[in-house]
Image: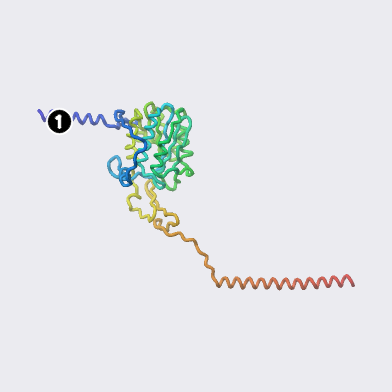
Amino acid sequence: MKALFGGVLYCFSLLVQVHGTNFRFYGYEPQRISPAIRYTRPVLRPELPLGTQAAQNAISATGRQCKSRPLDLVLIIDSSRSVRPGEFEKVKIFISDMIDTLDIGQYATRVAVINYASTVKIEFHLKTYFNKVDMKQAVSRIEPLSTGTMSGLAIRTAMNEAYTEKAGARPPSQNISKVAVIVTDGRPQDKVQEVSAQARASGIEIYAIGVDRADMQSLRLMASTPLDEHVFYVETYGVIEKFTSKFRKTLCGKDICSLGTHGCEHICVSTTDSYYCKCQDGYILNEDKKTCSKEVKPVVVVDPCKCESLVQFQRTVQSAIQSLASRLEEMTKKVQQYEHRLRHF
Protein backbone atom coordinates (compact mmCIF):
# COMPACT_ATOMS: atom_id res chain seq x y z
CA MET A 1 0.00 0.00 0.00
CA LYS A 2 2.84 2.40 0.85
CA ALA A 3 4.54 1.62 -2.46
CA LEU A 4 1.31 2.36 -4.35
CA PHE A 5 0.82 5.66 -2.49
CA GLY A 6 4.45 6.67 -3.20
CA GLY A 7 3.97 5.90 -6.91
CA VAL A 8 0.86 8.11 -7.02
CA LEU A 9 2.77 10.99 -5.42
CA TYR A 10 5.62 10.56 -7.92
CA CYS A 11 3.23 10.67 -10.91
CA PHE A 12 1.50 13.74 -9.46
CA SER A 13 4.86 15.54 -9.12
CA LEU A 14 5.63 14.78 -12.78
CA LEU A 15 2.28 16.25 -13.84
CA VAL A 16 3.04 19.44 -11.87
CA GLN A 17 6.43 19.74 -13.58
CA VAL A 18 4.95 19.25 -17.06
CA HIS A 19 2.24 21.84 -16.37
CA GLY A 20 4.91 24.35 -15.38
CA THR A 21 6.91 24.00 -18.63
CA ASN A 22 7.89 27.38 -20.08
CA PHE A 23 7.04 26.78 -23.77
CA ARG A 24 3.69 25.43 -25.00
CA PHE A 25 2.71 24.79 -28.61
CA TYR A 26 -0.74 25.48 -30.02
CA GLY A 27 -0.47 24.51 -33.69
CA TYR A 28 -0.35 27.89 -35.44
CA GLU A 29 -0.51 29.67 -32.10
CA PRO A 30 2.73 31.36 -31.02
CA GLN A 31 5.01 29.86 -28.45
CA ARG A 32 4.37 31.29 -25.00
CA ILE A 33 6.31 31.88 -21.79
CA SER A 34 4.69 31.81 -18.36
CA PRO A 35 4.65 35.25 -16.63
CA ALA A 36 5.40 33.51 -13.34
CA ILE A 37 9.04 33.21 -14.33
CA ARG A 38 10.60 36.65 -14.23
CA TYR A 39 13.92 38.16 -13.31
CA THR A 40 15.90 41.25 -14.24
CA ARG A 41 19.55 41.98 -14.83
CA PRO A 42 21.39 45.10 -15.89
CA VAL A 43 22.03 45.56 -19.61
CA LEU A 44 25.79 45.79 -19.20
CA ARG A 45 27.45 43.01 -17.25
CA PRO A 46 31.10 42.56 -16.33
CA GLU A 47 32.88 40.77 -19.13
CA LEU A 48 34.11 37.28 -18.28
CA PRO A 49 37.64 36.17 -19.13
CA LEU A 50 38.02 35.52 -22.83
CA GLY A 51 38.13 31.75 -22.59
CA THR A 52 35.16 31.55 -20.21
CA GLN A 53 33.10 33.98 -22.28
CA ALA A 54 33.78 32.05 -25.47
CA ALA A 55 32.82 28.78 -23.82
CA GLN A 56 29.56 30.19 -22.48
CA ASN A 57 28.69 31.73 -25.83
CA ALA A 58 29.18 28.34 -27.48
CA ILE A 59 26.76 26.37 -25.28
CA SER A 60 23.48 25.65 -27.01
CA ALA A 61 20.10 25.07 -25.44
CA THR A 62 20.74 21.34 -25.61
CA GLY A 63 23.89 21.70 -23.54
CA ARG A 64 26.27 20.84 -26.39
CA GLN A 65 28.91 23.25 -27.57
CA CYS A 66 28.41 24.91 -30.91
CA LYS A 67 29.07 28.15 -32.71
CA SER A 68 26.37 30.39 -34.13
CA ARG A 69 26.30 30.46 -37.91
CA PRO A 70 27.26 33.82 -39.40
CA LEU A 71 24.28 36.11 -39.87
CA ASP A 72 23.34 39.59 -40.95
CA LEU A 73 20.98 40.11 -38.00
CA VAL A 74 18.68 43.15 -37.67
CA LEU A 75 16.79 43.61 -34.40
CA ILE A 76 13.66 45.78 -34.79
CA ILE A 77 12.24 47.06 -31.49
CA ASP A 78 8.96 48.82 -30.79
CA SER A 79 9.35 51.87 -28.53
CA SER A 80 5.87 53.37 -28.97
CA ARG A 81 4.07 55.16 -26.16
CA SER A 82 2.47 51.91 -24.96
CA VAL A 83 5.90 50.57 -23.97
CA ARG A 84 6.67 51.89 -20.49
CA PRO A 85 10.26 52.98 -19.69
CA GLY A 86 10.86 49.99 -17.43
CA GLU A 87 9.55 47.63 -20.09
CA PHE A 88 11.78 49.18 -22.72
CA GLU A 89 14.78 48.55 -20.46
CA LYS A 90 13.83 44.86 -20.38
CA VAL A 91 13.80 44.83 -24.20
CA LYS A 92 17.34 46.22 -24.14
CA ILE A 93 18.35 43.50 -21.70
CA PHE A 94 16.93 40.93 -24.13
CA ILE A 95 18.96 42.44 -26.98
CA SER A 96 22.08 42.47 -24.84
CA ASP A 97 21.56 38.79 -23.99
CA MET A 98 21.06 38.01 -27.68
CA ILE A 99 24.39 39.66 -28.48
CA ASP A 100 26.09 37.58 -25.79
CA THR A 101 24.95 34.34 -27.46
CA LEU A 102 26.33 35.27 -30.89
CA ASP A 103 29.78 35.15 -32.44
CA ILE A 104 30.12 38.84 -33.26
CA GLY A 105 32.72 39.91 -35.80
CA GLN A 106 33.42 41.24 -39.25
CA TYR A 107 33.58 37.71 -40.66
CA ALA A 108 31.02 36.23 -38.22
CA THR A 109 27.64 37.68 -37.22
CA ARG A 110 26.94 41.36 -37.78
CA VAL A 111 24.13 43.09 -35.88
CA ALA A 112 22.06 46.22 -36.55
CA VAL A 113 19.32 47.69 -34.34
CA ILE A 114 16.27 49.58 -35.61
CA ASN A 115 14.16 51.56 -33.16
CA TYR A 116 10.65 52.47 -34.29
CA ALA A 117 7.37 54.07 -33.30
CA SER A 118 5.66 56.55 -35.68
CA THR A 119 9.14 57.21 -37.05
CA VAL A 120 12.04 54.85 -37.62
CA LYS A 121 15.60 55.29 -36.39
CA ILE A 122 18.51 53.00 -37.26
CA GLU A 123 20.47 53.04 -33.99
CA PHE A 124 23.51 51.39 -35.60
CA HIS A 125 24.25 49.58 -38.86
CA LEU A 126 25.64 46.11 -39.56
CA LYS A 127 29.05 47.65 -40.26
CA THR A 128 29.19 49.83 -37.11
CA TYR A 129 30.39 47.42 -34.40
CA PHE A 130 32.35 44.17 -34.62
CA ASN A 131 32.77 43.53 -30.86
CA LYS A 132 30.26 42.83 -28.11
CA VAL A 133 31.38 45.46 -25.61
CA ASP A 134 30.87 48.45 -27.91
CA MET A 135 27.66 46.97 -29.29
CA LYS A 136 26.11 46.45 -25.85
CA GLN A 137 27.11 49.94 -24.77
CA ALA A 138 25.36 51.33 -27.84
CA VAL A 139 22.24 49.31 -26.93
CA SER A 140 22.26 50.73 -23.40
CA ARG A 141 22.12 54.26 -24.86
CA ILE A 142 18.97 53.68 -26.96
CA GLU A 143 16.06 55.93 -25.98
CA PRO A 144 12.36 55.24 -26.71
CA LEU A 145 10.66 57.28 -29.44
CA SER A 146 7.30 57.18 -27.59
CA THR A 147 4.78 57.73 -30.39
CA GLY A 148 2.73 55.41 -32.67
CA THR A 149 3.41 51.89 -34.02
CA MET A 150 4.51 51.85 -37.67
CA SER A 151 5.72 48.25 -37.92
CA GLY A 152 5.42 48.14 -41.71
CA LEU A 153 7.61 51.22 -42.07
CA ALA A 154 10.21 49.64 -39.77
CA ILE A 155 10.35 46.45 -41.86
CA ARG A 156 10.61 48.49 -45.08
CA THR A 157 13.50 50.47 -43.57
CA ALA A 158 15.27 47.25 -42.65
CA MET A 159 14.82 45.88 -46.16
CA ASN A 160 15.78 49.05 -48.09
CA GLU A 161 18.42 50.58 -45.80
CA ALA A 162 19.78 48.17 -43.19
CA TYR A 163 20.26 45.22 -45.56
CA THR A 164 22.36 47.08 -48.12
CA GLU A 165 26.04 46.47 -48.78
CA LYS A 166 26.66 50.16 -48.08
CA ALA A 167 25.26 49.63 -44.56
CA GLY A 168 27.38 46.52 -43.99
CA ALA A 169 25.30 43.63 -45.34
CA ARG A 170 27.34 40.93 -47.08
CA PRO A 171 26.80 40.45 -50.85
CA PRO A 172 24.64 37.53 -52.06
CA SER A 173 27.76 35.73 -53.32
CA GLN A 174 28.82 35.10 -49.69
CA ASN A 175 25.53 33.30 -48.92
CA ILE A 176 25.14 34.86 -45.45
CA SER A 177 21.68 34.41 -43.91
CA LYS A 178 19.62 37.56 -43.34
CA VAL A 179 17.55 37.36 -40.16
CA ALA A 180 15.25 40.02 -38.68
CA VAL A 181 13.66 39.85 -35.21
CA ILE A 182 10.80 42.30 -34.52
CA VAL A 183 9.52 42.89 -30.98
CA THR A 184 6.19 44.70 -30.54
CA ASP A 185 3.42 45.04 -27.98
CA GLY A 186 0.68 46.60 -30.10
CA ARG A 187 -1.28 46.59 -33.32
CA PRO A 188 0.53 48.13 -36.31
CA GLN A 189 -0.92 51.45 -37.48
CA ASP A 190 0.16 50.72 -41.06
CA LYS A 191 -0.13 47.72 -43.38
CA VAL A 192 2.42 45.00 -42.76
CA GLN A 193 1.32 42.15 -45.01
CA GLU A 194 2.67 43.44 -48.34
CA VAL A 195 5.97 44.85 -47.08
CA SER A 196 6.63 41.74 -44.98
CA ALA A 197 6.04 39.54 -48.03
CA GLN A 198 8.49 41.68 -50.02
CA ALA A 199 11.08 41.38 -47.26
CA ARG A 200 10.71 37.62 -47.09
CA ALA A 201 10.89 37.37 -50.89
CA SER A 202 14.18 39.29 -50.79
CA GLY A 203 15.66 36.57 -48.58
CA ILE A 204 15.03 37.97 -45.09
CA GLU A 205 13.88 35.45 -42.46
CA ILE A 206 11.54 37.24 -40.02
CA TYR A 207 10.84 36.28 -36.40
CA ALA A 208 7.95 38.13 -34.71
CA ILE A 209 7.72 38.43 -30.92
CA GLY A 210 4.49 39.78 -29.46
CA VAL A 211 4.20 41.10 -25.92
CA ASP A 212 1.08 41.73 -23.83
CA ARG A 213 -1.37 43.59 -26.15
CA ALA A 214 0.29 42.49 -29.40
CA ASP A 215 -2.02 41.64 -32.29
CA MET A 216 -1.57 37.95 -33.11
CA GLN A 217 -2.84 38.25 -36.69
CA SER A 218 -0.27 40.98 -37.43
CA LEU A 219 2.52 38.83 -36.01
CA ARG A 220 1.53 35.99 -38.36
CA LEU A 221 1.44 38.35 -41.34
CA MET A 222 4.97 39.57 -40.58
CA ALA A 223 6.70 36.30 -39.74
CA SER A 224 8.29 33.69 -41.98
CA THR A 225 6.95 30.17 -42.23
CA PRO A 226 6.53 27.77 -40.54
CA LEU A 227 4.66 30.13 -38.23
CA ASP A 228 4.99 27.93 -35.14
CA GLU A 229 8.77 28.39 -35.39
CA HIS A 230 8.75 32.14 -36.14
CA VAL A 231 5.88 33.59 -34.09
CA PHE A 232 6.22 33.94 -30.31
CA TYR A 233 4.11 35.51 -27.63
CA VAL A 234 4.95 36.53 -24.07
CA GLU A 235 2.42 38.00 -21.63
CA THR A 236 4.75 40.54 -20.02
CA TYR A 237 8.06 42.20 -20.77
CA GLY A 238 9.31 40.79 -17.48
CA VAL A 239 9.95 37.37 -19.03
CA ILE A 240 11.05 38.34 -22.54
CA GLU A 241 14.65 37.45 -21.66
CA LYS A 242 13.61 33.80 -21.58
CA PHE A 243 13.56 33.89 -25.38
CA THR A 244 17.35 34.14 -25.38
CA SER A 245 17.85 30.39 -25.02
CA LYS A 246 15.24 29.74 -27.70
CA PHE A 247 17.03 31.92 -30.24
CA ARG A 248 20.40 30.54 -29.22
CA LYS A 249 19.17 27.08 -30.19
CA THR A 250 17.70 28.42 -33.44
CA LEU A 251 20.79 30.37 -34.52
CA CYS A 252 23.28 27.75 -33.43
CA GLY A 253 24.44 25.64 -36.35
CA LYS A 254 27.31 23.73 -37.83
CA ASP A 255 30.24 26.05 -38.39
CA ILE A 256 32.98 24.52 -40.53
CA CYS A 257 35.49 27.22 -39.63
CA SER A 258 35.20 26.39 -35.92
CA LEU A 259 35.92 22.71 -36.56
CA GLY A 260 39.48 23.43 -37.71
CA THR A 261 39.21 21.24 -40.80
CA HIS A 262 38.80 24.01 -43.35
CA GLY A 263 42.46 24.24 -44.40
CA CYS A 264 42.50 28.03 -44.76
CA GLU A 265 46.00 29.36 -44.16
CA HIS A 266 44.92 32.80 -42.90
CA ILE A 267 41.19 33.50 -42.47
CA CYS A 268 38.20 31.17 -42.69
CA VAL A 269 34.82 32.84 -43.38
CA SER A 270 31.70 30.77 -42.66
CA THR A 271 28.59 30.93 -44.81
CA THR A 272 25.19 29.36 -44.23
CA ASP A 273 26.28 25.86 -45.18
CA SER A 274 29.87 26.24 -46.33
CA TYR A 275 32.90 28.54 -46.05
CA TYR A 276 35.58 30.32 -48.05
CA CYS A 277 39.15 31.45 -47.36
CA LYS A 278 40.56 34.97 -47.22
CA CYS A 279 44.08 36.33 -46.86
CA GLN A 280 45.43 39.02 -44.58
CA ASP A 281 46.33 42.42 -45.98
CA GLY A 282 49.40 42.27 -48.17
CA TYR A 283 48.73 38.68 -49.28
CA ILE A 284 46.82 37.15 -52.17
CA LEU A 285 44.85 33.90 -52.33
CA ASN A 286 46.53 31.21 -54.38
CA GLU A 287 44.81 29.11 -57.03
CA ASP A 288 44.04 26.39 -54.48
CA LYS A 289 41.74 28.93 -52.73
CA LYS A 290 43.25 28.04 -49.35
CA THR A 291 46.88 29.16 -49.12
CA CYS A 292 48.21 32.70 -49.34
CA SER A 293 51.29 34.26 -50.89
CA LYS A 294 52.96 37.55 -50.24
CA GLU A 295 51.67 40.09 -52.70
CA VAL A 296 54.61 41.14 -54.87
CA LYS A 297 54.33 44.05 -57.25
CA PRO A 298 55.87 43.26 -60.64
CA VAL A 299 59.31 44.81 -61.19
CA VAL A 300 60.08 45.92 -64.71
CA VAL A 301 63.55 44.65 -65.67
CA VAL A 302 65.07 46.51 -68.57
CA ASP A 303 66.98 44.40 -71.07
CA PRO A 304 70.29 46.22 -71.73
CA CYS A 305 70.39 44.79 -75.23
CA LYS A 306 67.00 46.28 -75.94
CA CYS A 307 68.21 49.61 -74.56
CA GLU A 308 71.27 49.66 -76.86
CA SER A 309 69.11 48.79 -79.84
CA LEU A 310 66.66 51.53 -78.93
CA VAL A 311 69.45 54.09 -78.58
CA GLN A 312 70.93 53.04 -81.92
CA PHE A 313 67.52 53.28 -83.54
CA GLN A 314 67.01 56.74 -82.10
CA ARG A 315 70.42 57.86 -83.40
CA THR A 316 69.65 56.50 -86.87
CA VAL A 317 66.31 58.27 -86.98
CA GLN A 318 67.85 61.51 -85.72
CA SER A 319 70.61 61.30 -88.35
CA ALA A 320 68.06 60.70 -91.09
CA ILE A 321 66.00 63.65 -89.94
CA GLN A 322 69.07 65.90 -89.94
CA SER A 323 70.02 64.70 -93.43
CA LEU A 324 66.53 65.40 -94.75
CA ALA A 325 66.52 68.83 -93.11
CA SER A 326 69.89 69.64 -94.69
CA ARG A 327 68.69 68.58 -98.13
CA LEU A 328 65.49 70.58 -97.68
CA GLU A 329 67.56 73.62 -96.80
CA GLU A 330 69.74 73.22 -99.95
CA MET A 331 66.68 72.80 -102.16
CA THR A 332 65.08 75.88 -100.62
CA LYS A 333 68.20 77.93 -101.46
CA LYS A 334 68.21 76.71 -105.07
CA VAL A 335 64.54 77.60 -105.48
CA GLN A 336 65.24 81.08 -104.16
CA GLN A 337 68.14 81.47 -106.64
CA TYR A 338 65.92 80.42 -109.57
CA GLU A 339 63.22 82.86 -108.50
CA HIS A 340 65.80 85.65 -108.30
CA ARG A 341 67.07 84.95 -111.84
CA LEU A 342 63.56 84.87 -113.25
CA ARG A 343 62.76 88.28 -111.82
CA HIS A 344 65.85 89.80 -113.44
CA PHE A 345 65.64 88.00 -116.80
Coloring basis for residues:
rainbow
Q: Indicate whether 337 appears above or below 78.
A: below
Residue at (78%, 72%) from the top-left corner? 331
Taking 193 as reference, is 13 left or right? left
Quadrant of residue 89 in the image?
Answer: top left
Residue at (49%, 61%) from the top-left corner? 297
In this view, which residue lies farthest toward the front? 46
Image x and y of residue 247, in percent: 34, 38
Circle 1 residues within 10 Å: few <14, some 14–19, many ≥20: few
For the N terminus, the image quarter is top left
Residue identifier under label 1: 7
Residue at (49%, 44%) from the top-left corner? 166
Residue at (28%, 40%) from the top-left corner? 62
In this view, which residue lies farthest toward the right? 345
Q: Indicate whether 162 appears above or below 303.
A: above
Camera-side residue of 73 and 96: 96
Residue 68 appears in the figure: yes
Image x and y of residue 218, in percent: 41, 29
Quadrant of residue 241 in the image?
Answer: top left
Image x and y of residue 226, in percent: 36, 35
Considering the numbered disc 1 on the image, is that residue within a helix, a strand or a loop? helix
**What is the three-letter code of the residue carrying label 1?**
Gly
Image x and y of residue 168, in percent: 46, 44
Residue 177 appears in the figure: no
Camera-side residue of 102 and 174: 102
Quadrant of residue 43 in the image?
Answer: top left
For the C terminus, the image quarter is bottom right
In this view, which residue lies farthest toward the left? 1
